[in-house]
Image (spheres, grey):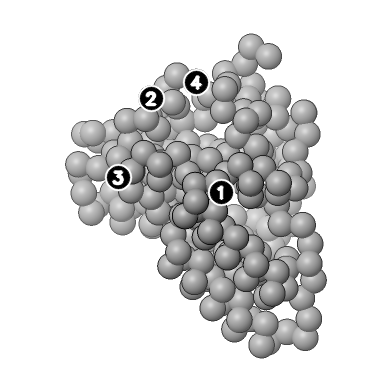
Amino acid sequence: MTCSCSYLWRIERSPPSYIFGTMHVSHERVWPYMSKEIRQAFSSSTHVYAEFNPTDDTYWDDFLQCIVNRTRRVERSTDYPIRGALLDMYLIMEAHRSNKTTGSLETPDYFCEKKGMLASLKTWMFIVDKIKNRMKTGTFENETLNNLEMNETEELRKIYICNEFDDEYIDNLPNSTEEFQDIEQRDENMSRRIHSLLKKSKKNRYFFAVGAGHMLGKREHLIVRLKKYGYKIT
């Protein structure tokens, strides 16, 4: 495959910061096809933020507390395969290994509300404990992430790598009103979070890894919302 993925938006400031559009696919199958600009933006960054940060123990503690609270309100939970956004996690892990500052754009409560009922409290406790242990031993990526069931196809991988995941593709996806409202709310929350981080320091080189769908489509997506704060984004 000769394609080169280029879902990268530059926030014009000195030094510049970047927003990288990810997809929930395993990094081994797509990272080799990332453009030189994406690799350079990531390498030169000082702060890397993803939708959630698996390296943060406090994040997981708050997440589990939320699961406990939710479990008290429901009669039963089901155990489904937990799918992993491996490209996102790979970037956070690499940033962590390189001693970059890492963080989350979304709160533990949001992750809990949307993903919490995919598994029982007992299962989540096991998963979180395993993640924390793997983080300490440095084997998180190899033993945990690669074993997560992935919902990806060769067609999806090609669409992403070859930049066919565009406004038209997004607009043609069948979305329910609830799904649309959810992504709109997430765009708003993440735009506020990014704006808050950018305001804190003009010296930091941020690299924000966010699902590409949040920056695409003929709607008020994440980039549109950030531009309303006055940022020039190219």
Indicate the secondary structure of the residue bearing disc 3: loop
In terms of sequence position, does the residue under pointer 3 or pointer 2 come before the other? 2
Element under disc 2:
helix
Q: Are marks 2 and 4 in contact (CB under 8 Å)?
A: no
Residue 193: in sight, yes or no?
Answer: yes
Work out how far the residue at label 1 is from the one at label 2, CA to CA, in angstroms: 25 Å
Q: What residue is shown with label 2? A: 40
| Disc number lying in front (3 or 4) | 4
Horizontal and vertical percent for residue 96? 40, 45
Mark 4, residue position: 35
Q: Amino acid at mark 1?
A: Phe
Tell me which amino acid carries mark 4. Answer: Ser
Q: Amino acid at mark 3?
A: Gly
- The number of discs equals 4
Rendered view: 80 above or below 161: below
- Residue 207 occupies quadrant: top left
Which numbered tag is attached to residue 230? 3
Q: Secondary structure at mark 1?
A: helix
